[in-house]
Image (tube, rainbow, N blue to C red):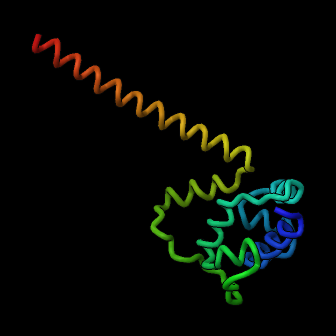
Amino acid sequence: MQKDSVDAVIARLKSIHDVESDSALAKALSTNAQTVSSWKSRNSIPYALCVNIAKKHGVSLDWLISGTGQAPTAGIKEPAASYGLSKREEIVLELFNGLDMEQQQEVIQDAKERQRIAEMEKNLKALQDQMEELKKSG
C-alpha cells in the first residue's frame, strides 16, 4: 500500500470514529498509538481490521480502503448488524485486530497447529477404538 493510501485510510478511520488524532484513533480501536504509528511506517493496515470496521460501522469496504464507492452517511455511530457473529466471535475478532500483523500471523499459525493436533488426536482415538474392537473379536 502506498504511503498516501495508508494516510488516506487512516483519515477515513478517524472520520468513522469521529476523532482527529492518531492517539484518539488508537483508543477508539482499542489499541495503542504505537500500533497506528507502525501502520504508517510499514505502509500497511491489517486488512482484517478494515473488514471488521466496515462491517461494524456499516460502511463500504471499497470506500474505507480506496475512497471510492459508497461513502458513509454523516454521523454513523452505531455498529451495523452483527452479521451473524456470536459475542464470543466478536470479542476474538476485536482482540485479533488489536494485534500487529506479525502477532496476527502467530495467532493464525498457533490456531492451525492446534487444529492439526486436534485432528491427529481424533484419528488416534479412532485407531485405538478399532484396535480394541479387533482385540475383542480376535
Count of numbered marks = 0
Residue nearest the viewer, comparing 124 with 56: 124
Vertical placement of residue 71 versus 28, above or below: below
Q: Quick check: 113 left or right of 22?
A: left
Q: x and y percent of residue 121 in the render?
A: 39, 28
| Residue at screen point 89% across, 64% down | 3
Q: Nearer the viewer, residue 77 or 64?
A: 64
Please tell me which residue is depicted at 72% across the width and 64% down the height of the picture.
Answer: 29
Q: Quadrant of the C terminus?
A: top left
Q: Nearer the viewer, residue 42 or 91?
A: 42
66 vs 23: above or below: below
Q: Position of residue 130 (x, y in %)?
A: 22, 21
* Point 70% across, 87% down: residue: 75
Q: Quadrant of the N terminus?
A: bottom right
Dividing the picture into quarters, in which one does residue 26 lie? bottom right
Looking at the image, which residue sits at the far bottom? 74
Percent x, y for residue 112? Answer: 54, 39
* Residue 80, above or below 6: below
Horizontally, residue 16 falls left or right of residue 22, namely: left
* x and y percentages locating residue 119 in the rendered image: 41, 33
What is the quadrant of residue 7 in the picture?
bottom right
83 left or right, relative to 35: left
Residue at 51% over, 76% down = 81
Please tell me which residue lies in front, 93 or 27: 93
